[in-house]
Amino acid sequence: MIPVILLRNVSKDYRTDSVLVRALHDVNLEIPRGEFAVILGPSGSGKTTLLNLLAGIDTPTSGGVTVDGESTQNLTPEALTDFRRRKVGVVFQFFNLIPTLTALENVELVGELCGRAEESAPLLREVGLEERLQHFPSELSGGEQQRVAIARALVKNPAVVLGDEPTGNLDFETGRKILGLLRQINREQNITVLLVTHNTAIAAMADRVIRLAGGTVSEVAENPAPLPVGAVKW
């Protein structure tokens, strides 16, 4: 099976004044299409850097990143913007909704950039917000705001949904509902979901668990029997 995410000998360096920091070193990784994968690791292990490379927010210092058959290597800034628009949807820990726009308008804004604005309302209904379309973020609970963020990611019709600690700002029950929604999207729509988290309990529901340590992949394990979301506890 051709992987939807492919990293080959990827390294990422940052320079601060005269100090060189190597955030990732010689990372090799393959994730098949349709998997629910989790990246685990302590702070400073390179999780966020890896997510930014996959999202096209940043580019590697060396090596190659390919998502859904498209390499980000040597892309111009304009081409990277187009890549982000077409290939990936990102769900952040802190939602990143525009406070002056309604739930519907937050999704429509991204939908218009992708030529899919008409899908905004159906997607919000799909994530259980049919009664909240005209509400502003301040009028929504944390879980509802995260659902808007998920709909905003999905309106692109991406090959991959990337989650940056998507349950980290939510209570346990709400977080588990969000995980359930992401799993449902993964299974029903065959969208690859990759979550970056420090919460090791979430690994039990994943098809594949990648552990990072010191900027390198220390372990990749396939899970033959992922737990249902309702059985995950932390």
Image (tube, helix red, strand yellow):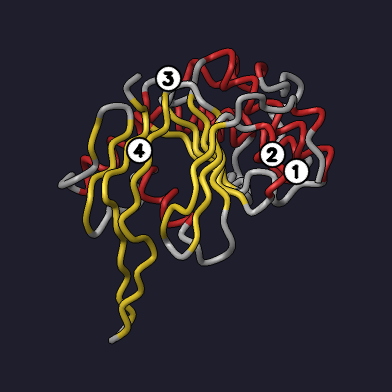
Q: Earlier in the sequence, mark 3 or mark 1?
A: 3
User: What is the secondary structure assignment of the residue under circle 2?
Assistant: helix
The reply to whether the C-beta atoms of the residues labelled 1 and 2 are less than 8 Å apart is yes
User: What is the secondary structure assignment of the residue under circle 1?
Assistant: helix
Residue position marked by numbered label 1 in the rendering: 142
Q: Mark 3 belongs to which amino acid?
A: Arg
Q: Mark 1 belongs to which amino acid?
A: Gly
Q: CA distance from mark 2 to mark 4?
A: 22 Å
Residue position marked by numbered label 3 in the rendering: 116
Residue position marked by numbered label 2 in the rendering: 145
Q: Earlier in the sequence, mark 2 or mark 3?
A: 3
The reply to whether the C-beta atoms of the residues labelled 1 and 4 are less than 8 Å apart is no
Q: CA distance from mark 1 to mark 4?
A: 25 Å
Quarter of the image holding residue 66? top left
- Name the outermost residue toward the bottom: 18
Classify residue 172 as left or right of residue 187: right
Q: Earlier in the sequence, mark 2 or mark 4?
A: 4
The reply to whether the C-beta atoms of the residues labelled 2 and 4 are less than 8 Å apart is no
Q: Which quadrant: the N terminus?
A: top left
- Asked if one can make out residue 88 in the rendered structure from this viewpoint, the answer is yes
Residue position marked by numbered label 4 in the rendering: 84
Say which of 207 and 61 sits in front. 207
